[in-house]
């Protein structure tokens, strides 16, 4: 069902004049209470009308199914690896088929242009699962003269996240849990009589996996199958409210919101993903420049009494030192948490006595390092369960 047809059959739904796409899963969960947003040119559910705190604990303790809007981009051809080594600050050459890797693209000045998950299917076939932002024109411009094609993969993504997620995957696959299926693994499996791709990835900081459709896949049947086998294991369908809380707790950044081309990967606290030993990627000279500041400017914010509001100014001693980019109330920590970008990198990532204000209101807070907990990523690796 198209978005317009769905809207015509649901009079309370209003259609924007802006062009966007709806997933093949939409009609399986959408109701009159659903609130949608647009990300990467795709419609996604911001809210299903449920209690976001209850959703959060369901995600933390069992499992949740999400319709997510990230857009996979196909890069294929004899020069695919060469092009991607030029694009990304990670080492693409060492990425094996059947594996995925977090990949950041920078501009010529070393500013963060795009981030996402790079999936290698074979020697000359990749998918780049992009965040929101303008990247397709950039990569195509740099592909001129290369034997490679760059196009929309026409794939839609569903995430299942939470401590019971791999149990759901095992029940959903006709041959059981793929083996091996470690962190950032990629596998092809049969679900509901259809072949789909799954990756051991997600945007929650929890144990989880993602399912990718392909042209010809019956998305509705796939969704129904996941819900049917997952319900006895505690799976529920959710909007992205609970993910919004968990991603901040886990220190996961949103491109264009928390970081942008004015920030290097070092400024965003992502310097560990820059590989100077590999190919001569775009922005390498700028990032390797002697004297370049490598301390992060993007840090965590902890507010005991309230939730930090994006856009709020952070001050110390009456002097503005930065602004808030994201905020959430953490049910697990029992405090308001968020991200802030500092005007200048601090000498230490832990600073007490700051004040967060927006207009006439001001509340005490502390600057902290990211993530707020599970710095070793034991939870998504399946090595630890919290709470």
Image: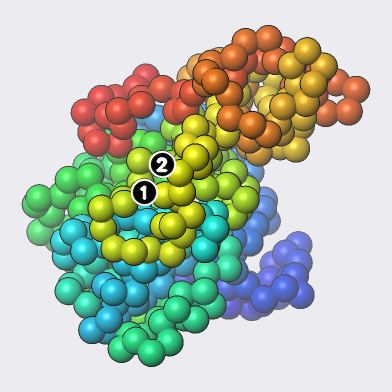
The answer to whether marks 1 and 2 mark residues whose Cβ atoms lie closer than 8 Å is yes
Residue 251 shows up from this direction: yes
Badge 2 local density, few (<14 within 10 Å), some, or many (20+)? some
244 relative to 222, above or below: above
In x, y percent, where is residue 281?
A: 37, 63
Could you tell me which residue is drawn at 26 percent across and 72 percent down?
Answer: 81
Between 187 and 102, the one nearer to me in the picture: 102
Camera-side residue of 320 and 314: 320
Tell me where residue 375 appears, x and y as whole percent. 36, 26
Q: Identify whether 335 is placed above or below 116.
A: above
Considering only vertical position in the picture, is 119 above or below 272?
A: below
Relative placement, left or right, of 343 versus 253 is right
* Quadrant where the image shows the N terminus: bottom right
Label 1, residues with CA under 10 Å away: few <14, some 14-19, many ≥20? some
Mark 1, residue position: 274
Report if residue 239 is visible in the image.
no
Image quarter for residue 385? top left
> Which quadrant, please, contains the C terminus?
top left
Residue at x 88% of width, y 28% of height: 359
Viewer-nearest residue: 266 or 29: 266
**Measured from the top left, where is residue 280 in percent x and y?**
34, 64
Quadrant of residue 231 within the rendered picture: top left
Observer-nearest residue: 132 or 274? 274
Up the image or down, 327 lies above or below 223; here it is above
Q: Name the residue under label 2.
A: 271
Please, which residue is most extreme toward the front here? 290
Please tell me which residue is depicted at 20% across the width and 53% down the height of the picture: 185
- Residue at image position (43%, 64%) is 282
Cα–Cα span, label 1 and label 2: 5 Å
Q: Is mark 2 on a helix, strand or loop?
A: helix
Q: Position of residue 27 (x, y in %)?
A: 53, 66
Left or right relative to 270: residue 37: right
């Amino acid at each position: 069902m198209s978005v317009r047809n769905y809207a015509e059959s649901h009079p309370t739904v209003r259609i924007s004049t802006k062009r966007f796409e709806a997933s093949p899963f939409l009609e399986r969960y959408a109701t009159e209470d659903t609130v949608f947003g647009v990300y990467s040119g795709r419609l996604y559910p911001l809210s299903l009308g449920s209690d976001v705190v209850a959703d959060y604990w369901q995600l933390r303790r069992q499992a949740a199914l999400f319709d997510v809007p990230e857009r996979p981009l196909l890069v294929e051809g004899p020069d695919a690896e060469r092009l991607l080594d030029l694009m990304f600050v990670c080492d693409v050459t060492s990425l094996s088929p059947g594996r995925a890797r977090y990949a950041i693209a920078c501009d010529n000045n070393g500013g963060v242009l795009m981030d996402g998950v790079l999936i290698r299917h074979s020697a000359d076939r990749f998918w780049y699962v992009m965040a929101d932002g303008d990247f397709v024109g950039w990569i195509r411009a740099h592909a001129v003269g290369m034997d490679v094609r760059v196009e929309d993969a026409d794939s839609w993504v569903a995430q299942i996240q939470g401590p019971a997620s791999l149990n759901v995957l095992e029940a959903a696959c006709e041959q059981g849990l793929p083996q091996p299926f470690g962190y950032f693994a990629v596998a092809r499996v049969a679900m509901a009589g259809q072949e789909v791709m799954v990756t051991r990835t997600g945007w929650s900081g929890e144990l989880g996996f993602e399912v990718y459709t392909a042209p010809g896949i019956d998305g509705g049947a796939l969704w129904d199958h996941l819900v049917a086998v997952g319900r006895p294991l505690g799976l529920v369908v959710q909007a992205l409210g609970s993910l919004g809380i968990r991603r901040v707790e886990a220190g996961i950044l949103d491109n264009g919101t928390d970081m942008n081309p004015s920030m290097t990967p070092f400024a965003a606290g992502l310097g560990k993903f820059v590989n100077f030993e590999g190919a001569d990627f775009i922005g390498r000279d700028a990032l390797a420049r002697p004297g370049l500041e490598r301390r992060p400017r993007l840090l965590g914010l902890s507010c005991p009494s309230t939730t930090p509001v994006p856009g709020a100014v952070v001050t110390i001693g009456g002097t503005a030192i930065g602004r808030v980019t994201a905020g959430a109330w953490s049910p697990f920590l029992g405090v308001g948490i968020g991200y802030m970008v500092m005007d200048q990198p601090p000498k230490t990532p832990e600073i007490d006595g700051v004040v967060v204000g927006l207009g006439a209101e001001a509340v005490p807070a502390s600057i902290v390092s990211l993530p707020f907990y599970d710095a070793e990523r034991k939870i998504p690796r399946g090595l630890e369960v919290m709470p």
